[in-house]
Amino acid sequence: MTAVVAPPTTDGLSVRGLSVRFGGLVAVDNLDLDAPEGRLTGLIGPNGAGKTTTFDACSGLNTPSEGSVHLFGNDVSRLGPPARAQRGLGRTFQRMELFNSLSVADNVALGREAAMAGSNVLRQIVASRHEQDEMMEAAAGAMELCGISDLADRRASALSTGQRRLVELARALAGRFRILLLDEPSSGLDHNETARFGDILERVMAERGVGLLLVEHDMSLVMRVCHHVYVLDFGKLIFEGSTDDIRDSEIVRAAYLGAEEV
Amino acid sequence: MLERLARALRGVSLAMSIVATIGILLAIQGVAVMRYGPRTLTMPAYLPTRSIRMVGVNVGLDQIITFLVALVAATGLYLFFRYSRMGVAMRGVVDDPDLLALNRVSPVRARRWAWFLGSSFAALSGVLIAPVLGLEAFVLTLLVVQAFGAAAIGRFSSLPLTYLGGLAVGVGASLSTKFVASVPSLRGLPSSFPFLVLFVTLLVLPRRLLVDSGAAVASPPPHTHSLPPRVARGGLVLGAGVALLVPWIVGARLPVYTNAVIYVLVFLSLRLLVRTSNQVSLAHAGFAAVGAAAFAHFTHAGLPWPLALLAAGLVGVPVGAVVAIPAIRMSGLYLAIATFGFGILLEQLIYPQSFMFGANGSLAVPRPHVSGVDLASDRGFYYVALTVAVLASVVVAWIHRSRLGRLLRGLADSPTALATHGADTKVTLVIVFCISAFLAALAGALFGALTGSIDGTPFGSFSSIYWLAILAVAGNGLIAPAFVAGIFIAVVPAYITNHTIIDLFPVMFGMSAIGNAIMSTRGSPFAGWLQGASIRSAGRADRSPVRDRMIIQEVAA
Ligand SMILES: Nc1ncnc2c1ncn2[C@@H]1O[C@H](COP(=O)(O)OP(=O)(O)O)[C@@H](O)[C@H]1O
Ligand SMILES: [Mg+2]
C-alpha cells in the first residue's frame, strides 16, 4: 500500500524520505515535502513536532539519518549551509540569529554581503565598489519592504522582539534567495504586528515571486496567506492539503486538541 | 563563591567568559605564588611507601592506595550522577537551567553542588598527587589541562571512559619515556604526551560534543568607542607626539618602551581574534616563538632585514592555520583548552629542536643596518618598531572597515546566520587566525632583534594566558587598548622596584579581567535598561498552546 512518491520538483525545494534522529528520538520521520517558487507553503504542527529540525535539515545544519534535500532539481544533501544558500535557499530562525552588535542596516546588508563573500579568500577580504553599491541598494530595498528604514542606525540588540523579527526577515530578503524558510516569524508579535506581518508577506510574494515555506503557530495567519499546508505531528506528516482541506480535517484538529491534555 | 561568579557570567560572550576563567586562574595562581613562593614545595609522603611485587612489576603501596581511592571516587560519582536526584539535576542545569527551574529544582542549588563537588574532587586529587609531583602552582594547573585530555576521551559525558582515559594517558606518558630514551630529538614527548592526546582527541571527537551548550545570549560589547571624533583625533595626535618624543625623554629605559611598542603587535593580533571575532587562542606565544626563530634563520641566511621580517611573519601563517582547525570544530572553553594544549606542545616538543633556536638553544638576532641612517641603536630601533606597530594598526583599522571586518563581527555574533546567508565561515576563521598569527610572529621577530639573541624562555605557554588577561583589562577601543596593554605589560613593571607589587600583578590583572568580563554584558545603565525591555517583550514569545488551540477552533468554527 505504499504511495508512489513524486519525483523532486525542479522549481523549488523538495524533501524526500527525510528522517532525523537525536539519539533514540525520531524528530522527523520519513517526510516528503515540496515548497515551489512563487508559492506560500505552510508547515504547522504542535511544539516539538519537528518543524525546526526539518528546516535545519533543509539548510544543512544537522545530519539527517535518511532522505535527501533537492533545490531546483539538484540533490544538495551533501552540501554545507553556505553552498545551499549560494543555490538560493535562505532562512530565518525561531530563536533569531541576529548580528546583535551591528546596526540594523549592517545586519541587513550582511544578508547580501555574506553570499558575495562566499568561500573565496580574496572576496571575503575586500568588496569591489560595484558590490558595495549593489549591497547598499539591496539592503535599502529590503528595509523599505519590511518598513524598518527608520531603524537603520539602531543597534540590533536594542530593538523589540517584533522589530527584531522584521530585521531578520529583511536580512533574508536582502539576499538573492529564491526559496525562504521562515521559522515562526510572528511569535512574540502582538495582534497588530502580526496583521502587519501578514501584509508584508503578501507584498513579498507579489513583488519578489520567491517561494516561502512558513512555520507558524498563528492559524489565522496561516489560513490567510498560505496556498498549501503540511501538518506534522511527532515527526510524521499527518496531513497535507489546501487551507480549506485543513479547516475540515478531523485529524488536524485531533492532533492539536490531543496536545491539550499533555 | 565560584558559583556566584558562574552565575554572573551567564550570558557573557564566549570569548569573554574564557577571559574571566583565565582571570580566575591567574588570580589564584598569583596568590599561591605570593603566599608560598614560586618554588616547589615538597610534601612528605604520608602513605606507606613499601612496594610489593605484582605480576612481575614493583608497585608502591601508596600507588595502589591512590589507584583505589580514584576508583572509588569515580564509581561514587558515577552512581551519584546516575541515580540521585541532585545528580540528575546537575546534568540538567547544563542543558537548560530555565527548564530545570520549571520543575522546581533550583538551578542555583544544583550549580552550587556542582562547584562543591568539582572543587572537592580537585582538592582530593591534589592531595593524592602532591607527594609525587610536589606542590607547584604551575604544574598543578597544567595537570588540569591534562585531565581534560582524559575527559575528552570520555567524550565529556562518560565517567567510566574518562577513568580509562586517565589511565591510558598516564600509562602512555610512562611508556613514551622508555621509547624516547633511544630518540633524543623527542625528549619533550613524555611531558607533552597528555597534551598530544588532548589535542588529537579534540580534533577527532564528533563536532556536536564540542559546542558549548548554554551559549551566550547577550550581545558582545559595542565594537567602537563612542568618543566624539574631535576627541579621538586629538588623542591620536597627542599619542603620536608622545610616541615620537619618547626616546628623548626616558633615557636609559628606552628598550622597555621599544618592548611595549612590539607588544602592540601582539595585542592587535589578539584584539582582532578575541574581541572582534569572538574566538580564543592560547597559542599566541607559540606564534611569536616561531616568528622569532624563523627571523633568526632568515637573517643568518643573508636575507635583507625587512624581507626577513616579512618572511618571519609569513612563517607564522601556516601555524595559525593549524590552530584554525580546532576553531572550525569547537568554540569557547574547548577551543581555549585545545589551543593551550597546542601551545604547550609547541613549547615542549618543538622549541627544543635545533631548527628552532639552534643546537645551543639560543640564536643571535641582528638589528637592521642601513648605511647613513641610524637604525641599529636603541633610539633608531625604537623608531623601527614604532613604524611597524603603526603600520599594523593601520592595517587592523582598515580590516575593521572592510568586508572582512563585517564578516568577523558577524562571526562573533552568529556564525550560523553568516553561514546560512552564504559565507563560508571556515574560510573566515582560517583568514583571521592567519592574520593574527602573522602579527604575533612579527612581534616575535622584533623581540629577538630588540634583545639581540633569542631563545624559548620569553615564549612560555603561560605567556599566552597572561597576554589575553591584560588585553581584557585594556579597554574597549580598537587600536588604543593595544598600546595601553603594551605599556601595562612592558613599561609599568620597569618603574616598580617593589617585588611584592610585581608579584601582585597577575592577581590584579586576573581580578580585573573577571570584572571586565562581567561588566561586558552590563555596559551603560541605559543599555541595560534596553536589554531588560527586550527581554520583557521576548517573554511574550512563549505564547500559550491553549491560545493556539483557541485560534484553531475559532478558525474551524
Ligand atoms: N539538538 C537536539 N538534540 C536533541 N533533541 C532535539 C534537538 N533538537 C530538537 N530536538 C527534539 O526534536 C523534537 C523536534 O524539535 P523541533 O524540531 O524543535 O520541534 P518544533 O520546531 O516543531 O517545535 C523535539 O522533541 C525536540 O526536543
Ligand atoms: Mg520550532
Image: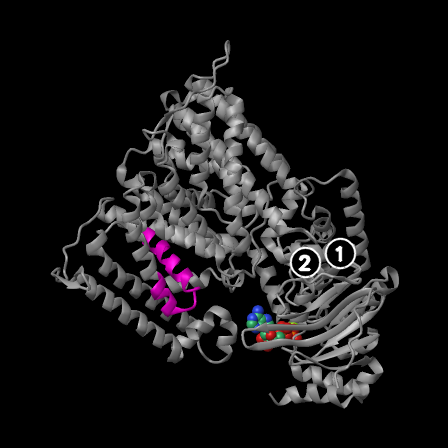
Residue A96 x %, y %? 65, 63
Q: Residues within 10 Å of mark 2 (few under 14, many from 20)?
A: few
Q: Is residue B158 magenta?
A: yes
Report if the CB atoms under discs 1 and 2 are less than 8 Å apart.
yes
Q: Which mark is residue A79?
A: 2
Say if A114 sits above or below B444 in the image.
Answer: below
- The label shown at residue B215 is none
Residue B356 percent coordinates (x, y): 40, 33
- Disc 2 marks which amino acid? Leu
Which chain is indicated by disc 1? A
Helix, strand or loop: magenta stretch: helix
For the residue pair A147 and A244, the one nearer the viewer reads as A244
Residue depicted at x 35% and y 58%: B147
User: On the rendering, which quadrant does ligand 1 occupy?
Assistant: bottom right
Span of residues in magenta? B141-165
* Three-letter residue code for mark 1: Arg
Q: Is-magenta flag for residue B259?
A: no
B313 left or right, relative to A258: left
The yes-or-no answer for disc 1 within 8 Å of ligand 1 is: no
What residue did someone put label 1 on? Answer: A87
Label 2's element?
A: loop
The answer to whether residue B274 is seen in the rendering is no
In the rendered structure, the answer to whether residue A225 lies left or right of residue B48 reads right
Query: Looking at the rendering, in which quadrant would you find the C terminus of chain B?
Result: bottom right
Give above or below for A180 relative to B496: below
Please, which residue is most extreme toward the top here? B372
